[in-house]
Image (cartoon, rainbow, N blue to C red):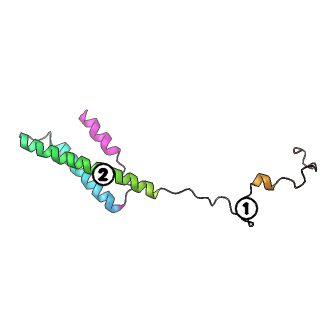
Amino acid sequence: MAGSTKGNWYKDHDIEQMSCSHQRVYGLRVKQVLLVYFEVPAMRYNNKQLQQLQTVLATAHIEIRKLQQEHAFLRKQLAPKPSNTDIPPSPSGRTTSPTVSSLPRNPTTPSKHPFIA
């Protein structure tokens, strides 16, 4: 159970899209958590040391959550905005639809095209 948690947790954190300074801080915090997480079972600690490690881990966890929120905010800020430059404005300043502008001026005149009445 612990092994799958470690692997999935690290894979879920995409730090490639962050700025260098943000990435550096985030990476250091992640490393701190992973070091504590991996080394705790390998060593024997007394209750006071375990409490201190739990405090460090909880603090690092809070820091990581804050960095994740900041990362999400920055990602949202850097997301490309949709633009309305696909349709050029008309010279008169009015918006026109391509289908409306291509209709014949006199609707009573039959079209010479065989498929258009």
Question: Which contiguous range is marked in magenta?
Answer: 1-19
The x and y percentages for residue 89 are: 69, 63
How busy is the neighbourhood of tag 1: few (under 14 within 10 Å), some, or many (20 plus)?
A: few
Circle 2 — which element?
helix
Q: Amino acid at mark 1?
A: Arg
N-terminal of the pair, mark 1 or mark 2, is: 2
Membership of 44 in magenta stretch: no
Q: Which residue is mark 2?
A: 66
The x and y percentages for residue 92 are: 75, 66
Question: Which residue is at a point 40% across and 56% down the rendered structure image?
Answer: 74
The x and y percentages for residue 24 are: 29, 59
Q: Camera-side residue: 47 or 97?
A: 97
Q: Camera-side residue: 117 or 107?
A: 107
Question: Which residue is at a point 35% across and 54% down the rendered structure image?
Answer: 70
The disc placed on residue 115 is none
**How many labels, in total?**
2
Q: Quadrant of the C terminus?
A: top right
Left or right, residue 56 beside residue 3: left
Question: Which residue is at a point 73% across and 64% down the rendered structure image?
Answer: 90
Membership of 14 in magenta stretch: yes
Q: Amino acid at mark 2?
A: Lys
Q: Quadrant of the N terminus?
A: top left
Between marks 1 and 2 in the image, the one whose residue lies nearer the viewer: 1
How busy is the neighbourhood of tag 2: few (under 14 within 10 Å), some, or many (20 plus)?
A: few
The disc placed on residue 94 is 1
Displayed quadrant of residue 20: bottom left
Circle 1 — which element?
loop
| CA distance separating discs 1 and 2 | 48 Å
Left or right, residue 77 beside residue 55: right
